[in-house]
Amino acid sequence: MLRRTLFVILAAALVVACNSTAKQGSQTEAEKTTGSTELKGKTFGAAFSPDGSIDYSEMAKQMDGRDSVELKIQGTVQEVCQMKGCWMLVASDDSNQEPVMVRFKDYGFFMPKDIAGRKVVMEGWAFREVTPVDELRHYAEDAGKSQEEIDAITEPKDEMKFLASGVLLLDEQ
């Protein structure tokens, strides 16, 4: 009798768990089909206030003489990882500086893949780092570059990077 009761309880728990997983999956699909134009004002990662943010073009001045600095920066998304949305390149509209590689703290959130051209504010840490060739090639592959472009990467790159704890989408395209 005890075994039968235990079996019924386990079977009921399994049915409830499977039903819950199916609902979560459908919500995820719905989120995937949401257009990026509906994301204006949405924060990814940790919530923060955009007050006190500086333009991306000012980031290098803030870094002067330091190995890293905590900042809120604003800029325009140039490119997003097309595999997962796990990194993006952000630049300033009125600057000739190279875009900054932005990754996300603890791999804890991803950005929509279709937000190139959108303005963002990011909170996190700016730092300098030498990016090895294999990592540069990996990023090029994620960005959908041709094999010829990937093979042309032969030198490591000393660059500014940004580790974002939160990203706020400001406008629509």
Image (spheres, rainbow, N blue to C red):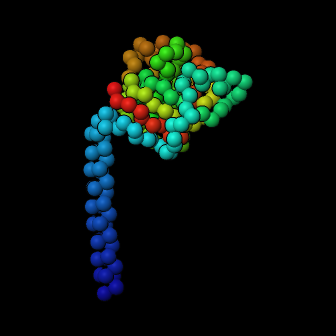
Q: Position of residue 73 (x, y in %)?
A: 54, 30
Q: Nearer the viewer, residue 45 or 39?
A: 39
User: Height in image: 76 above or below 121?
Assistant: above
Q: Residue furthest right?
A: 65
Hey, which quadrant is residue 118 in on the image?
Answer: top left
Q: At 71% across and 27% down in the image, what residue appears? A: 66
Image quadrant holding the C terminus, namely top left
Q: In this rendering, would 4 be left or right of 69?
A: left
Q: Nearer the viewer, residue 116 or 1?
A: 116
Q: Position of residue 92 (x, y in %)?
A: 49, 20
Q: In this rendering, would 164 be left or right of 8?
A: right
Image quadrant holding the N terminus, namely bottom left
Q: Position of residue 71 (x, y in %)?
A: 60, 33
User: Height in image: 29 above or below 2?
Assistant: above
Q: Nearer the viewer, residue 63 or 161?
A: 63
Q: Residue furthest front?
A: 51
How many marks are shown on the rendered structure? 0
User: Height in image: 100 above or below 28?
Assistant: above
Q: At 31% across and 37% down in the image, what residue appears? A: 38
Can residue 5 be seen here? The reply is yes
Q: Position of residue 116 (x, y in %)?
A: 38, 25
Q: Nearer the viewer, residue 110 or 119?
A: 119
